[in-house]
Image (spheres, grey):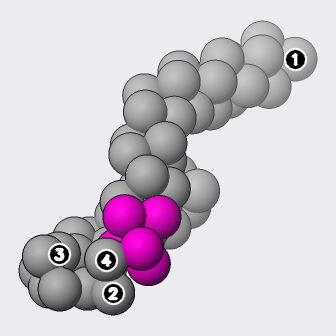
Amino acid sequence: MHDIYHVILKNRKIDRLIMPFEALYCVWLIITLILNFKLFAYSIDAQFVLITLFYFSGWI
């Protein structure tokens, strides 16, 4: 039982760390959609990095 609670607490800590990055990612997507990737051409690379970060955080 103790291990289950430990895993839940660990996942909550990871989620709290990642939530600001998710918010930043959403804002970044909105900006790139509005500006048609003109000023934020490098955003594709950043989005790839963020997507892999979210994938690994979900995998952990």
- Badge 3 vs badge 4, beta-carbon distance below 8 Å: yes
* Label 1 neighbour load within 10 Å: few <14, some 14-19, many 20+: few
Q: Residue 34 at x, y = what percent?
A: 42, 74
Mark nearest the camera among 2 and 1 is 2
Secondary structure at numbered mark 1: loop
Q: Which residue is mark 4?
A: 35
* Label 2 neighbour load within 10 Å: few <14, some 14-19, many 20+: few
Q: Is residue 3 visible?
A: no
Q: Which residue is mark 3?
A: 40
| Magenta stretch, residue numbers | 30-34
The CA distance from mark 3 to mark 4 is: 8 Å
Q: Residue 15 at x, y = what percent?
A: 57, 33
Q: Main secondary structure of the magenta part?
A: helix
- Badge 2 vs badge 3, beta-carbon distance below 8 Å: no
- State yes or no: residue 27 in magenta: no
- Badge 2 vs badge 4, beta-carbon distance below 8 Å: yes
Residue 21 position by quadrant: top left
The CA distance from mark 2 to mark 1 is: 51 Å
Is residue 50 placed above or below 7 in the rendered structure?
below
The CA distance from mark 3 to mark 1 is: 48 Å
Q: Residue 41 at x, y = what percent?
A: 14, 85
Q: Which residue is mark 2?
A: 36
Is residue 8 placed above or below 37 in the rendered structure?
above
Q: Which residue is mark 1?
A: 1
